[in-house]
Image: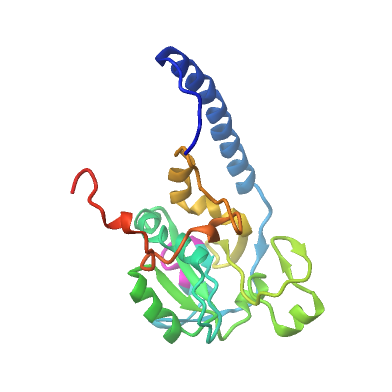
Amino acid sequence: MPSNKVVSREEWFQAHKAHLAREKELTRLRERIAAERRELPWLKIRKDYVFETEQGPKNLAGLFGVNSQLIVYHFMFGPGSTHRCEGCAFLADHIDGADQHLRHHDVSLVVISRAPLAELLPYRQRMGWKFNWVSSYASDFNFDMQVSFTDRQIAAGDTTYNFDTRPRTSKELPGTSVFFRDDNGDIFLTFMSRARGGEAQIGAYDYLDMTPKGRNENGPYHGLMDWVRLHDEYQDSRAAEPGCCD
């Protein structure tokens, strides 16, 4: 149990009012960084990637639909893998709610993995997700986006992820990539986020950060793997107890 100081109403009010100034600093800093992000240089995509989708083969342009902006979440799911990444699933649980609005704001959102579509769709059905999930198995897309690595790369220690090149053992890693398609049909990579950059897409963290116990990531890994599970695998009986409005 947290052991915070218990004070009078006036002391509580003044302490929280002072803290609000710090919260506003963070909000303004976030806005400035977002503006800086929009000013970053772009990289033109010159390769014609092909993806396996539920509607048949599509190139990268086809994933945009009618929108000019495309957000791709790179879900860790390699061909034949039996591992189901809890972290990727945690983030994926937040996608459908946002996607209902993004698609009406000139943004398409697609989840991409290297596993064939026949392996992805049963898992999507199990988890109850509705987002568009496609396979990059037949292309170099994941490798070019530096979220998948070949055996040769791993053996050589030639693995670049999150703008950092060092030895890694995982063939698949998560991330988000953002693209823009101009009026001429040219496509540009405008931004990529890797590693803990994905936390910004996980709204549950914002809820936890407001609570006295916070994220409660106290070991053994001191991260989300300490507690997060696939949402249909939680064994905590408290989840079955009625809430205030049941």
Q: Nearer the viewer, residue 116 or 64?
A: 116
Write down the quadrant of residue 170 in the picture.
bottom right
Q: Where is residue 164 in the image (x, y as percent from the top left)?
A: 76, 62
Q: Where is residue 90 in the image (x, y as percent from the top left)?
A: 46, 61
Residue 64 in magenta stretch: yes
Q: Is residue 199 left or right of residue 156?
A: left
Q: Residue furthest left?
A: 246
Residue at 34 percent of width and 57 percent of height: 100
Q: Where on the picture, by quarter, is residue 124? A: bottom left
Numbered label tally: 0
User: In the figure, 194 relative to 75: above or below?
Assistant: above
**Residue at the (79%, 67%) spot, across then down:** 166
Q: How is the image coloured?
A: rainbow
Q: Where is residue 127 in the image (x, y as percent from the top left)?
A: 36, 70
Let me know if residue 192 appears in the view: no
What residue is rendered at 57% in x and 39% in y? 30
In percent of width and height, residue 88 lies at: 50, 65
In the picture shown, does residue 16 fall above or below 104? above
Instruction: Confirm whether residue 104 shows in the render.
Output: yes
Whether the magenta-drawn stretch holds residue 18 is answered as: no
Magenta residues, as a range?
63-70
Q: Which of 226 and 206 is in front in this view?
A: 226
